Image (spheres, rainbow, N blue to C red):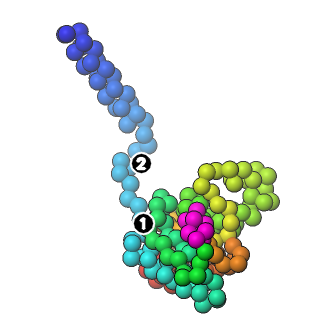
Amino acid sequence: MHSSLRLGALAVSLAFSALSVQAQQAPASAPAVRTERNLSLELANQIATATVAACAANGYAVAATVVDRAGVVRAVQRADAAGSHTLAASERKAWTSASAKAPTLAMMENAQKNPGAANLVNIPGFLLLGGGVPVKVGNEVIGAVGVGGAPGGHLDEQCANAGIEKVKAQLG
């Protein structure tokens, strides 16, 4: 009984020693806790509403999904006449854009022109079609909006940009 307690204590001691060594090796400037900006529900809803409205003004019935910086859905809107497939497309575009911190149209074009980027299409969940645009505060990506349903990814992207533009003053 005593030997198993000693072995357990030794294991705990070794674990703490390893953690101590790792902590000492971490850069002094790396904070233990990170502070990150993120999208509020209110802002996500405003972006989704403005995005669907921008497309509607051009005669396009779309779905818009807004995700936070981690790609988690915060808001979704689908125009009355938008096809059911537009929901999944908008979510995948938003997630792809937030994950890569880049517009999906640019990513698609890069994958088509650059053989080294062609395999991006094989990443589970990535959708390399135009219509996913990061939401930024300065250079920091705090989320993304994805649009599906306009007759072309470049038009989806225009609507996403218009939706972000409507809340630009709130992004600092």
**Is the residue under label 2 in contact with that under label 1 (CB below 8 Å)?**
no
Q: Is residue 118 magenta?
A: no
Q: Position of residue 141 (x, y in %)?
A: 51, 65
Determine which quarter of the picture holds residue 121: bottom right
Determine which quarter of the picture holds residue 36: bottom left
Q: Is residue 33 visible to the viewer in this orientation of the structure? A: yes
Q: Main secondary structure of the magenta part?
A: helix
85 sits to left or right of 75: right
Residue drawn where x is 79% and y is 52% of the image = 115
Residue picked out by circle 2: 30
Quadrant housing the C terminus: bottom left
Q: Is residue 162 visible to the viewer in this orientation of the structure? A: no
- At label 2, counting other C-alpha atoms closer than 10 Å, the crowd grade (few under 14, some 14-19, many 20 or more) is few
Q: Secondary structure at mark 2?
A: loop
Residue picked out by circle 1: 38
| Magenta stretch in the rendered image | 84-92
Q: Amino acid at mark 1?
A: Asn
Q: Secondary structure at mark 1?
A: loop
Residue drawn where x is 70% and y is 78% of the image = 151
Q: Position of residue 20 (x, y in %)?
A: 34, 32
Q: Is residue 56 above or below residue 47?
A: below
Q: Amino acid at mark 2?
A: Ala
Quadrant housing the N terminus: top left
In this view, the residue in front, 27 or 151, is: 151
Q: Is residue 89 magenta?
A: yes
Q: Is residue 32 above or below residue 1?
A: below
Specify the farthest residue to the bottom. 57
Residue drawn where x is 25% and y is 19% of the image = 9
